[in-house]
Image: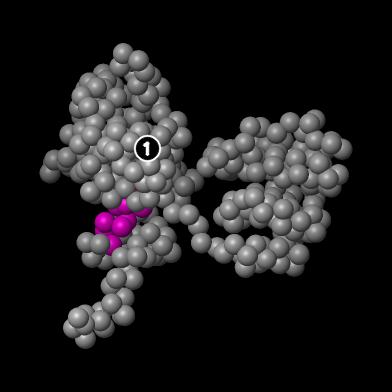
Amino acid sequence: MYLEPPFDASEAPGRGEDFALAERFGHIAGGAGEAFSRNTERAVRSDLAIFARWCGERGLRGLPAEPGTVAAFVDAMAEQRAPATVRRYVASIAAAHRALGLEKVLKSPPVRLALKRMHRKKGRRQEQAHGLTWPLRQRLMAATGDRLIDDRNRALLAVAYDTMLRRAELVSLQVPDLLEEIGGDATLLVRRSKTDSEGQGEIVWVGWDSLRLVRTWLGGGGVEGGPLFRSVGKGGRVGDRLHPCQVPRIFKAMARAAGLPEAVVEGLSGHSTRVGAAQDMVAAGLELPAILQAGRWKSTAMVNRYGQRLLAQRGAAAQLARLQDRE
């Protein structure tokens, strides 16, 4: 997720308490005793900073905002941002208002109509990360070298594919969270995730081949505890835990080394292993409940989206054509 630098309310024309939305939300979140995750708070504050700057440049009040103000903001942002980004902005503005008991503002007809105008003009379909499927995974693996950073990258990619973890979840893994099982494979404890903000913890599976790669990385880097995946500097110096933004950069670098087309490289993201593994599961004909469990999804929406081309090939129209024995 792109995050703008922290907004300085003093830079906004007509500055005042109403324009320091990001800071006000920070106080709200802080007073909530960590009810918001760090990623959520950081994202909301960044989005509110954008809204605050936009309001400040026009001399408009940001909190509480008039429905017409939010609707005009949606119209303006729809000209330069993707619909999914604009919806996220609105969700962040709603979070700030909801925290102050002002949620009705975002449910008003002007705001709903502004979002509808945007969707009619630009559609709701989101850009999807390029799936890092098994063949691509193998191609990236084969193109790596024998340096310590290559050991780390192979282990990172293998675990990301097996576990289908999001990038923030991946870099939060700790060495003690890895438990080798009798059968030669392993399990990982995911202490906190996007769908488990209260930290009940979830167990994910790691294959025996991936476990071997992890052992090689840990042994070569002398990593015995703390973060499972760490930065590797010049001369193979092992540093602190990876930042989430490093995950897609690593995948892209591996893809370039493998000689993949630039269009494919640019389509990779921290979600690519999650998308690719889901596509492979659909292609293998695995049952939907098992796929939902592996990806920790609560609904079929994302699985259907990731595998929609494969599912279309198995749909009634495709089945009928095969039964008709078309030439």
Q: Residue at x 26, y 34 (%)?
A: 154
Seen as rendered, the residue at the extreme left is 183
Seen as rendered, the residue at the extreme front is 327
Residue 32, given in percent of the width and then of the height, sits at 64, 41
Please say which color scheme the image uses.
one colour
**Which quarter of the figure is the C terminus placed in?**
bottom left
Magenta-colored span? 270-282
Magenta run includes residue 280: yes
**Picture quadrant where residue 169 is located:** top left
Which residue is at the front of the view, 36 or 146? 146
Residue 21, given in percent of the width and then of the height, sits at 74, 41
Magenta stretch mostly in which secondary structure? helix
Whether residue 276 sits left or right of residue 212 in the image: it is right
Seen as rendered, the residue at the extreme bottom is 324
Q: Which residue is mark 1?
A: 252
Q: For the residue carrying disc 1, how many other residues have a C-alpha within 10 Å: few (<14), some (14-19), or many (20+)?
A: many
Whether residue 43 sits left or right of residue 60 in the image: it is left
